[in-house]
Image (spheres, coloured by chain):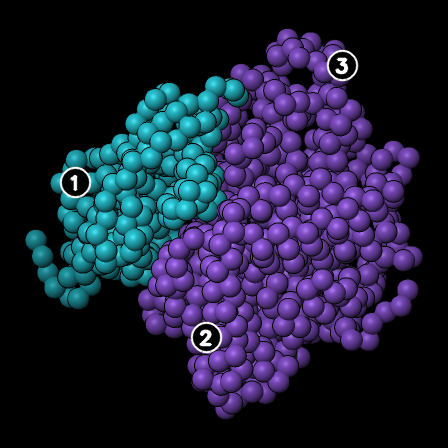
């Protein structure tokens, strides 16, 4: 804990609504404590704006523990800012120095239209999950939980993928606005599990093809992995690509066709 | 004790272990082909809401689900870290449905309804099966079977977990089941939509009025039944571990339409949170109770000891929980651990720059197990801690202090989870039913999923079956039109005050009054003080709040203003309930009522009841209805964790 207070210049994207033009605005902010989270810095700025009669900056946030995935913005051009593996709400002002100039923008991607200021619409992620990001197990139909042993390494790997918080930083970081990391993380979570095998091939095709209707294509920049607050590995994208190819062949075989 | 004939908990007869089976058999059924003729509106998509909506849709009901987030997966259940209890007895350490039932009734300090708790313990085993089938990646042993750990208030290991992100994984499981039903067209999702009123016609809940948070449009949803799964009210204290948007609005507006609010004074103060650091603090962060499995809680023996922790020799450290409660040690229930920490800090033995915490030390665990094992168990929690405090828990003990975390009180429901308003069901943290005066760790996830997957889907048919063929009350009905006009009026009123104080500023003031007077220790005098101050803050709000911007756009100040307006009314009920309950039990500690050793002193002769309050107007004393608690199986006793 530190008593030192800092002064900063904050440049923020202001946009009144989805269909209006936006612009950057500059604000001076005094009294920033190094112990503040980035969102608490924005709270402080918003209090200053309200006092001066200007509408506060709209931004999405909720749990402020780095798990709900609501928050996310471009901080000096980087999704969630300068600290690796850290969501915006867990970034603290001690990572910036006195006199810093911070530029804040919403996540920019064709698939994430802006609602207002820093708030974007990430519903396209829901459409991908709805197309197949689940294991069909209607309530009540489950066998005993210990009936299927799952090797620890498999469960751990599945969990590595499953911890995606759906924040959209991967898309915002990608020069192509691609959602491969998000989609592959959900696919890997389910495709690695024994319970997920029955729907594995259909799930892969449905989710990949839904993804492609909203998002750009992956060209292996790996910016997504660097921006991910949960450090999800691009290895899962390789698994998704492999599964997608295998799924195409499996479907032909199941349909009675032959292939080399 | 005078009891109330207005309250009928509809508990089935027969032996405790047979009640749920009996109810499932007695409940009227809706034929599979007729289920699609019923519409159910579900508000909230946390564990309870998402699991209920998905399961009802699988059964064939038409479901409309409302979430104020951009996607259902963001609900605050996602932040639960530690785990979920179930009486599987996989570790072979003597667990059973009866033991989980017993521990929960006892942990709740004998203020829960036995029949509900027994059902919860019964279905707990099904929940784990269900979640595994959905692909929830629970922690596993090397042999591939499920791993368990211990939590407070239990002497068996019955907690299933997925690293420190159990809530996230369970919620994603329920969200995915819900997403499947949305994709199939069986559920209609209204995201970025906030429920602002319940609509009641002829004494029945018939729908809700909402505001779309992006467009500002006010609109109605009609259903044959309404299900509220809208979480708890911890943010009445402003600083809590709840998510920033968590609020009491849906429950409070239902209360104002006639639904009884039960036991609002039962608030849980979680013992292991990161202490507050400054006035800009926007929320408190929880460190999972699972840390108490391996961490040891201590303070220096001397008061005002300013030495850094590694300079305090072993002989000058007081592991006060291990000393006072040798049988349970660091794993005593939450209320007991919280009060013990408060006692140390109040006595001047607090640590940290503001002397507002106690240490949670992993030094022993790291020497015993090695850093790698500790990292595997708690690595992500240590990371969260380091980001916030800039201290490394592998080398420096964590500083922790209690914070408001969970609320056991909520809307009153009967055994079927229906409130006193027919057609209104309440699930999860939003209801009052299963945790009595104190919830045990890893039981919130259990209850949310029990209500949504395994209770409501059976009990709702009993209400709906006789309504076969009746259409829903249309949104053009005068009942809806009047409520929509009221919602629009309130919005315009909030925008027209144009005062000088921000919503957060007033909310913070309310929170301070609540924490200081209705917090961990409550007295007649502090409660009287709160009951004088709360109405004054409420008046100030309606005279002097500043809400900028417009109605017809995303306006987060306006959203907050509506929620804080409700907290300002609800806070009074919470304090009133605390003043009326002249005993200490679980999370409700009245300093006048304690044993010589400083433990909670219950008064079973006069207070073994559920206090269900009926709204009578803002600032008017509510009517009290009492539901007697009868203990057939677990004998009333003073809790002992020594």
Q: Are marks 3 and 2 on the same chain?
A: yes
Q: Distance of mark 2 from mark 1, alpha carbons?
A: 41 Å
Q: Chain of mark 3?
A: B
Q: Is residue B232 above or below residue B198?
A: above
Question: If you read the primary sequence from the N terminus, does the residue marked by circle 3 or circle 2 appear first?
Answer: 2
Question: Which one is in front, B358 or B630?
Answer: B358
Q: Residue at x 23, y 58 (%)?
A: A19
Q: Secondary structure at mark 1?
A: loop
Q: Secondary structure at mark 2?
A: strand
- Residue identifier under label 3: B302
Q: Is residue B589 left or right of residue B209?
A: right
Please tell me in which quadrant of the rendered image residue A91 appears: top left
Q: Is residue B79 left or right of residue B463?
A: left
Image coordinates for residue B625, horizontal then vertical, percent: 79, 68
Image coordinates for residue A259, horizontal then vertical, percent: 9, 57
**Chain that the image shows in purple:** B
Q: Distance of mark 1 from mark 3, alpha carbons?
A: 59 Å
- Residue identifier under label 1: A175
Q: Is residue B417 above or below residue A196?
A: below
- Residue identifier under label 2: B221
Q: Chain of mark 2?
A: B
**Chain that the image shows in cyan:** A
Q: Is residue A107 left or right of residue B346?
A: left
Q: Residue at x 79, y 37 (%)?
A: B641
Q: Secondary structure at mark 3?
A: loop
Q: Residue at x 85, y 49 (%)?
A: B583
Question: Which one is in front, B30 or B491?
Answer: B491
Question: Which one is in front, B183 or B227?
Answer: B227
Image coordinates for residue B633, horizontal then vertical, percent: 82, 59
């Amino acid at each position: 804990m530190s008593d030192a207070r800092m002064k900063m210049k904050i440049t923020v994207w202001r946009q009144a609504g989805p269909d209006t033009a936006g612009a950057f605005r500059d604000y001076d902010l005094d009294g920033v404590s190094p112990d503040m989270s980035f969102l608490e810095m924005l709270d402080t700025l918003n209090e200053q704006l309200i006092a001066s009669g200007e509408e506060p900056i709209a931004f999405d946030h909720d749990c402020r523990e780095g798990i709900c995935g609501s928050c996310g913005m471009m901080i000096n051009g980087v999704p969630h800012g300068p600290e690796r593996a850290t969501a915006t709400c867990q970034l603290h002002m001690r990572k910036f120095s006195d006199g810093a100039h911070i530029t804040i923008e919403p996540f920019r991607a064709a698939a994430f239209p802006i609602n207002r200021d820093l708030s974007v619409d990430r519903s396209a992620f829901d459409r991908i999950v709805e197309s197949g990001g689940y294991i069909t197990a209607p309530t009540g139909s489950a066998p005993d939980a210990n009936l299927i042993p799952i090797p620890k390494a498999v469960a751990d790997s599945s969990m590595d993928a499953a911890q995606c918080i759906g924040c959209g930083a991967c898309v915002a970081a990608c020069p192509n606005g691609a959602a491969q990391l998000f989609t592959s993380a959900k696919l890997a979570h389910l495709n690695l599990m024994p319970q997920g095998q029955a729907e594995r091939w259909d799930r892969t095709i449905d989710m990949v093809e839904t993804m492609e209707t909203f998002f750009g294509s992956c060209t292996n920049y790996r910016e997504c992995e660097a921006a991910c607050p949960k450090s999800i590995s691009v290895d899962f994208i390789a698994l998704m690509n492999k599964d997608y190819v295998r799924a195409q062949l499996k479907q032909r075989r199941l349909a009675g066709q032959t292939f080399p | 004790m005078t009891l109330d004939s207005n309250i009928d908990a509809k508990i089935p007869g027969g032996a405790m272990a047979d009640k749920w089976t009996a109810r499932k058999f007695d409940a009227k059924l809706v034929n599979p082909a007729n289920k699609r003729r019923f519409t159910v509106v579900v508000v909230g998509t946390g564990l309870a809401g998402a699991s209920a909506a998905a399961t009802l849709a699988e059964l064939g009901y038409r479901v409309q689900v409302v979430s104020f987030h951009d996607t259902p997966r963001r609900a605050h259940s996602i932040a639960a870290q530690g785990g979920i209890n179930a009486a599987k007895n996989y570790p072979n350490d003597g667990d059973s449905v009866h033991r989980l039932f017993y521990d929960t009734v006892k942990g709740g300090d004998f203020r829960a309804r036995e029949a509900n708790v027994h059902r919860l313990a019964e279905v707990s085993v099904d929940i784990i099966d269900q979640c595994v089938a959905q692909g929830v990646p629970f922690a596993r042993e090397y042999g591939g079977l499920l791993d368990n750990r211990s939590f407070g208030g239990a002497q068996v290991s019955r907690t299933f977990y997925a690293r420190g992100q159990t809530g996230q994984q369970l919620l994603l499981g329920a969200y995915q089941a819900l997403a499947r039903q949305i994709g199939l067209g069986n559920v209609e999702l209204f995201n970025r939509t906030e429920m602002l009123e319940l609509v009641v016609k002829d004494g029945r809940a018939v729908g809700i009025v909402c505001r779309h948070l992006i467009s500002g449009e006010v609109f109605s949803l009609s259903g044959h039944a309404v299900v509220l799964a809208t979480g708890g009210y911890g943010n009445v204290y402003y600083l809590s571990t709840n998510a920033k948007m968590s609020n009491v609005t849906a429950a409070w507006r239902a209360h104002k339409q006639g639904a009884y609010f039960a036991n609002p004074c039962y608030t849980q103060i979680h013992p292991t949170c990161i202490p507050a650091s400054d006035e800009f603090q926007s929320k408190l962060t929880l460190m999972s109770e699972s840390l108490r499995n391996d961490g040891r809680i201590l303070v220096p023996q001397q008061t005002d000891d300013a030495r850094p922790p590694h300079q305090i020799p072993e002989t000058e450290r007081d592991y006060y929980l291990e000393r006072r409660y040798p049988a349970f040690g660091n794993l005593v229930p939450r209320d007991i651990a919280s009060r013990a920490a408060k006692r140390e800090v109040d006595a001047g033995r607090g640590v940290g720059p503001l002397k507002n915490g106690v240490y949670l030390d992993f030094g022993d665990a790291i020497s015993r197990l090695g850093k790698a094992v500790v990292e595997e168990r708690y690595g992500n929690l240590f990371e969260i801690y380091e980001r916030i405090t800039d201290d490394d828990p592998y080398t420096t003990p964590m500083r922790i202090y209690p914070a408001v975390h969970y609320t056991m009180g909520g809307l009153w429901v009967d055994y079927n989870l229906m409130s006193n308003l027919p057609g209104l069901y309440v699930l999860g943290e939003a209801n009052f039913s299963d945790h009595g005066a104190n919830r045990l760790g890893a039981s919130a996830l259990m209850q949310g999923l029990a209500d949504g997957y395994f209770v409501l889907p059976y009990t709702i048919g009993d209400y709906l079956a006789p309504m076969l063929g009746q259409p829903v009350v249309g949104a053009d009905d005068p009942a809806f039109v009047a409520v929509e006009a009221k919602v629009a009026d309130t919005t315009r009123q909030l925008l027209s005050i144009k005062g000088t104080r921000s919503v957060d500023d007033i909310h913070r003031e309310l929170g301070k009054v609540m924490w200081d007077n209705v917090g961990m220790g409550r007295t007649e005098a502090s409660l009287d003080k709160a009951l004088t101050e709360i109405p004054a803050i409420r008046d100030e709000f309606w005279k002097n709040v500043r809400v900028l911007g417009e109605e017809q756009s995303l306006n987060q100040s306006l959203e907050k203003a509506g929620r804080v307006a409700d907290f300002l009314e609800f806070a009074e009920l919470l304090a009133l309930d605390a003043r009326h309950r002249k005993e200490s039990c679980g999370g409700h500690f009245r300093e006048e009522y304690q044993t010589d050793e400083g433990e909670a002193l219950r008064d079973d002769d006069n207070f073994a009841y559920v206090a269900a309050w009926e709204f009578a107007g803002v600032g008017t004393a509510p009517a009290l209805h009492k539901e007697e608690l009868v203990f057939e199986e677990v004998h009333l006793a003073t809790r002992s964790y020594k």
